[in-house]
Image (spheres, rainbow, N blue to C red):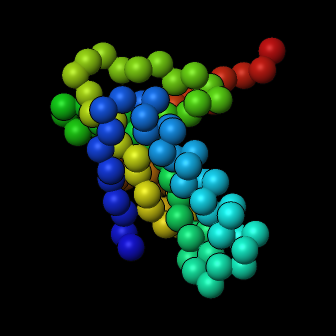
Amino acid sequence: MKEVKLPFPDMKACNARRQMLYRLRNDMEKEGHPTFPLASKVSMSCIYELPDGEKILFFNHTKTPAPPKPFKVYLWLRPRDLQDEDILEKAGYKIPEVPTLD
């Protein structure tokens, strides 16, 4: 699998589906499901995609603001080994700055 982008009407629906998939993966591990090792290698992120093709990762814990409309919302599924920042940036994905804890 290279990557899959599933469209959603809004970020709330995207996050709900992502959390459901995380719970399913956790249940697979508890049950010793034979395909759990494969499922554990998949990264799931909600992204905004702007009309010009720019993609912005959504981080719930940092309260990423919604970009100016219009935009599309996707659940982005990809192998974990694609999480390297250089690869993401070369693919056109913008990684938000991590806020400081003062």
Residue 17, position as x, y percentages in the image: 48, 45
Residue 63, position as x, y percentages in the image: 57, 22
- Residue 53, image quadrant: top left
Q: Residue furthest bottom?
A: 34
Instruction: State the quadrant of the N terminus.
Output: bottom left
Q: Residue furthest left?
A: 51
Instruction: State the quadrant of the C terminus.
Output: top right
- Comparing 71 with 102, the one in front is 71
| Whether residue 56 can be seen here | no
- Comparing 9 with 56, the one in front is 9
Q: Residue at 69% across / 61% down in the picture?
A: 26
- Comparing 21 with 76, the one in front is 21
Residue 31, position as x, y percentages in the image: 72, 74
Q: Residue at 50% across / 38% down in the picture?
A: 15
- Comparing 13 with 76, the one in front is 13
Q: Residue at 56% across / 49% down in the picture?
A: 20
Instruction: Report whether 91 appears left or right of 52.
Output: right
The number of numbered discs placed on residues in the rendered structure image is 0
Instruction: Report whether 51 appears left or right of 15.
Output: left
Residue 90, position as x, y percentages in the image: 37, 52
| Whether residue 40 can be seen here | yes
Please say if 15 is above or below 63.
below
Q: Residue at 32% across / 39% down in the picture?
A: 8
Please say if 93 is above or below 91.
above
